[in-house]
Image (cartoon, rainbow, N blue to C red):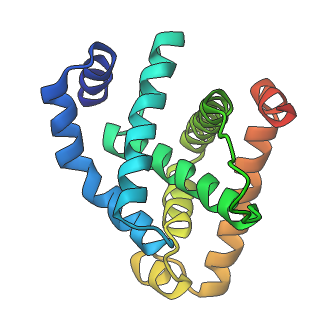
Amino acid sequence: MEGKFFLEAIEKNDSSVIKTIYEQSFYAIKQFVLQNKGNSEDAEDVFQKALLQIAVRLKKEKFEIKSSFEGFLYTVCRNLWRRELNIRKNRVTNNEVVEQVSEERDTALSYLEIKKQELFVEKLGMLSENCRNILNLFFAKMPYAEILATTEYSSETVIRQRVFKCKKKLTELIRGDVRYMKLKAV
């Protein structure tokens, strides 16, 4: 219900709810950006772009969020910031040239990233509960020793093998979906 409520508020440009979204989610986004070579202004820009891109996407098509809204927004912001870091890394600095950023291109890339994330989450949900748990811990960058402590496996080697098999199964599910080829081709 939370995701639908927030999406409707963004679509209606409900400033009081958008303020609540900001209060609930901005700190985590800011921490991520600060920890990844950014500053407070960068975090504000990314947060605003994310909300704008969600609004644009809602105008193009209605969609649902299967996870929490805060997690969805965090993912959108994280993808935007990583793309910005890649642009900065590849940018040649020349004070006499003004670079124009294509908002349409930026929005299109964000849309594709969201679609890829949705496909990933859907296919992750199709795995066994054991695989989902192991992969969630792995993707959260939890060390194998800590995963061992929270599971009933006998060794880190067994966990490594399990992660490998679960990642392989997830990859097969994703690549077997017709949407994968469409998303990959773009």
Residue 142 position in % (x across, y down): 49, 76
Residue found at x 59% / y 87%:
155
Residue 166 position in % (x across, y down): 68, 58
Q: In this view, does 24 lie to the left or right of 119?
A: left
**How many numbered marks, from 0 up?**
0
Q: In this view, does 117 lie to the left or right of 17?
A: right
Residue 165 position in % (x across, y down): 73, 62
Q: Is residue 67 left or right of residue 3?
A: right
Residue 169 position in % (x across, y down): 74, 50
Q: In which quarter of the image is residue 149?
A: bottom left
Residue found at x 31% / y 59%:
28
Q: Which one is nearer the viewer's eye here, 171 or 85?
A: 85
Any part of residue 86 in sight: yes
68 in relation to 27, above or below: above
Q: Which one is nearer the viewer's eye here, 111 or 163?
A: 111
161 in relation to 106, above or below: below
Q: Which one is nearer the viewer's eye here, 113 or 68?
A: 113
Name the quadrant of the C terminus: top right
Any part of residue 166 in sight: no
Name the quadrant of the N terminus: top left
Residue found at x 65% / y 79%:
158
67 in relation to 44, above or below: above
Q: Which residue lies furthest to the left in this view?
A: 16
Residue found at x 50% / y 60%:
136
